[in-house]
Amino acid sequence: MRARTFASLALAPLLLVAFAGGTAVGAPSHVLLVGSWHGVNGQYRTIQSAVDAAQSGDWILVGPGDYHESAWDDLAGVYITTPGLHLRGMDRNRVIVDGTLPQATKPCDPNPALQDFGPMGEEGYAEGRNGVWVDEVNGVSVENLTACNFLSSKEGENGNQIWFDGGDGSGHQNMGAFTGRYLTGTSTYYVDGDPRLAQYGLFADNTYGPGLLSQGYASNMADSSIYIGACPDCNVVVDHVIARYSAIGYSGTNSGGHLIIQNSEWDHNRSGIVPNSLNNDDQPAPQDGACPDQEPGPYGNGSCTIFRNNYVHDNNNPNTPTNDTSGLVPIGTGIETPGASNDTFVGNTVVNNGGWGIVIFDFPDSETPPPGVNCQGGVGYGQVCFFAASGNEVAHNRLAHNGFFGNPGNVDLGNEASSVIPGNCFHGNTDPKGLTSDPQDIETVDGTCGGPAPGDLTLAGQLVCASGLLDMGYPGFQCPGPANYPQRTQVRMSGIEPQPSMPDPCAGVPTNPWCPAGGGSPHGPGPASQGPATFPVRPVRTGGAR
């Protein structure tokens, strides 16, 4: 599993906060309480019963507890189809939507016998489950809670912890505004050889926005911690999130247009940030960060998909869960762009990635596409859909200690991509010990944005070696020179790391028994939320020499 332009993407967070706190004109909002909070009992014992009773504009507050929920024939924990609903936990770390069976004795129990793999499908195997599933409705906010151990089928279907679903697999964008804040998505379950794993932590697809994912944390995913996909003009901001211990930190399949990924930390994954083009059901391809309607974009270079002010480090982990696709990403990569175009990478700190700090490359996708998907945005060569990576700009990033695996082509900055116009350009990047690159002197040979920029095609072989594709058997292929990349030994699932909770869970909520102050907690605000560290960036201009 895996548009609409609004006036200024910079206004998105403000608009979303305003939207999340509002209701339809003339429609009074109600507050439905689940569980108990400071000794005051709510009206509902389960989250889904409150969701079923709620109307558009209503608030659902959830007290601390380990909620083993089941909805929609057990394909989901909590299933939301009411627009404008606001679901908020009162304590992020103690409100847990738990995918394990009710007889589990502790939250998010890793015991294989206590996992709920979902209902049996027609082929006789479990169909997988999703945690909090928002299905093709606008204006929903989900905040301040944890979802864990929602697992996929053997075919990799489902397995999303928090899912804003705008029409998965449809090729259409059927969801507008959504908000996800102070959310944790993780899993503790892993059995070697069992493909029924948690796939995605915080997941949004087929949206035209405006959307916001902020103050999120996700880990231990077989695909990616954070995923935005299948939206040519996503209109989404991802801000202050942490993504670690997954096959991929951020995956952005066929997403683009207005899309900003910023102020976030991506570490200890197999690969950190991966915007990519694929010929799959996350249609329409390709991944394209070009601004719609010839807009200049935030940096005046015509790109509206921006990766900025992120901390991308130590993505060298072979012992994460993986699936058939994610297990083939080149290990040891901070930022990579398989067949991605017109994206801007500016002001990021990229350190301690053993293969590459930032590497741009074309991608020949050989997977079998679903019916009706015909290599849109790529060039077909038999069973292969070839996506060229072009027009990407890599500017003013701080790099250090990348490429330490020591294989040919392992460097701070790499460009494999063929020299199409516009080529991929690099300028203003630094490494305190001297910038390393392939091709050499990349900021000279590929320093002009908008024109041709020759890449090094020999990097393709080294990327194949880093991906593990050789384990699948390619007769006659040999790695160019040494190929020393970490190999999986034993997957160890990290523990659940407590994260900052929303400072005041009553903020913006109508007066109710848990929030009698009318939007302020009677118990005072909670601890100040720190969130992931930010890494200030001096103002920069992209565009290089044109």
Image: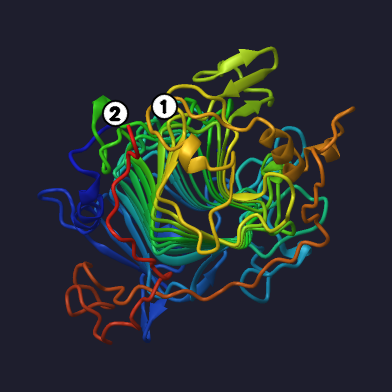
Q: Please name the residue that numbered disc 1 is placed on.
A: 172
Residue 388 seen in the figure: yes
Q: Residue at x 67, y 36 (%)?
A: 459
Q: Which of the colour schemes (rainbow, by chain, secondary structure, one colour) is used?
A: rainbow
- Report the label total: 2
Q: Please name the residue that numbered disc 2 is placed on.
A: 292
Residue 440 higher or lower than 529, as above or below: above
Q: Where's the C terminus, which quadrant?
A: top left
Q: Where's the N terminus, which quadrant?
A: top right
Residue type at numbered disc 1: His
Residue 160 seen in the figure: no
Q: Is residue 30 left or right of residue 470?
A: left
Disc 1 crowd, CA 10 A, few/some/many (<14, 14-19, 20+)? many
Disc 2 crowd, CA 10 A, few/some/many (<14, 14-19, 20+)? some
Residue type at numbered disc 2: Pro
Residue 530 at x, y percent in the picture: 38, 76
Which residue of the protein is positioned furthest toward the right in this rendering?
Answer: 475
